[in-house]
Image (cartoon, helix red, strand yellow):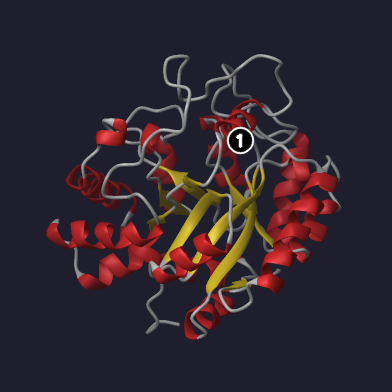
Amino acid sequence: MKNTNVVIDCLQYNNWDRSLFKATRDGGVHAVHVTVSYWEDMQETLQNISKWHRHFENHADLIMPVRTAADVIEAKSSNRLGIIFGFQNCSPMNDDLGMVQVLHELGARFMQLSYNNQSSLATGCYENNDPGITRFGKQVIKEMNRVGMVIDMSHSAEQSTLDAIALSKRPIAITHANPASFHPALRNKSTAVLQALADSGGMLGLSLYPFHLKHGSDCSLQQFCEMVAEAVEIMGINQLGIGSDLCQNWSYETLEWMRSGRWTFHADHGEGSADNLNWPAQPDWFRNSGDISNIARGLQQAGFSNEDIAKVTGNNWLAFFDRSFTSL
C-alpha cells in the first residue's frame, strides 16, 4: 500500500443519496467514514445499517463497504466510494459489552465513547466535571482493542481523552477536531492531548466544521493551512488526516436531533446560539468533498511537499486503518 495514494475523509454526516455518492466519488474521495448513529439505541442503529445495505444494493456501481484497509484500495481501483461505518456515541451498545463484537461484525470500525454529554463510558466535552473513563469504559476499551474497533474521542472531555489514550493498547483516533491553540472551541483539543495522542501513535482528523475554525465560516484557506503546519509541529506529519465533519442535505430538525437527542426537552444550541440556530455556512473554499483538492493546493502553497500532502489527505488514514481494523 506504500505506493498507493488515496483520499480519505474520516468523518462526514450526510443525508446520503445517489447524487451525493456520485458527487463525492467524482470529487476524488476514495473512502469516507460515515456517521451511522448519534443517539440511536441498538434497534434504531440496526435500522440505520439496514438502510445502508439498501444503499449498497441499489448503488453498487458507486459505493462499497469498507471493513479493511485493502477495501479502500479496492474502492479506488473499481472507481467506487468506500463507506466506513462509525458511531458518534456509545448508545448503539445498549450498555452491553457483548455488543461491541456484534457491531464490529456488522461493519462498525469507529465508536466514540461519549458525545458531548456524560455517558456510561466517558465524559463529554460539554460537561463541567470530567472524572475520566468509567469502570465500564475500561472494559469497553479492552474489547474494542480486541476486535479491531477504533476508539474515537472527538466529542469527549480532556481527562477522559487522556485516560483513553493511556488505557488503550492500540492507538486511538480523534477523527474530527482541531488544536485548541488555533481556536478555543470546546470540541477542539489541547496541546497536552495532541502530544499524548502523537506519542501513542494515534491520529487526528482535522475538522472543517465552521465552529471549529478560527473566524468560523470566514476562516481562510491560508489560515487553515497554517493550522495544519502548527499541528505538524505538535504531532508530526504522519499522524494527521482530514475529518471534515461535513454535513450535507439535512434540515434544521436533524441539527436539533444532533444537539438534543432525547436527553433534554429544551433546545440545546451546542456550539451555536439562540441567534445562530441553523447549520453554519461552510468556508467558500470547502463546500463539498471535491474541495479537498483546495486543501491540497493550499498546503502546496504553504510549502508542504507532495508526499506530505498525500499523507494528510489520505495516506496516513490508510496506514492507520491497516494497523487498526484487524482483531488482536
Q: Going by the image, does 41 lie left or right of 133?
A: right
Question: In the image, residue 100 lies at what x, y percent?
Answer: 78, 54
Where is residue 328, by image quadrant? bottom right
Tell me: residue 1, above or below residue 276: below
Q: Residue at x 73, y 66 (%)?
A: 54
Question: In the image, residue 271 lies at what x, y percent?
Answer: 46, 25
Q: Going by the image, does 284 lie left or right of 158?
A: left
Tell me: residue 164, above or below residue 156: below
* Amino acid type shown at disc 1: Thr
Does the image show residue 188?
A: yes
Q: Where, quadrant-wise, is the N terminus in this rendering?
A: bottom left
Q: Residue at x 20, y 46 (%)?
A: 226
Q: Going by the image, does 175 lie left or right of 302?
A: right
Question: In the image, residue 156 lies at what x, y percent?
Answer: 56, 34
**Residue picked out by circle 1:** 254
Q: Residue at x 34, y 67 (%)?
A: 311
Question: In the image, residue 252 lies at what x, y percent?
Answer: 55, 31
Does the image show residue 182?
A: no
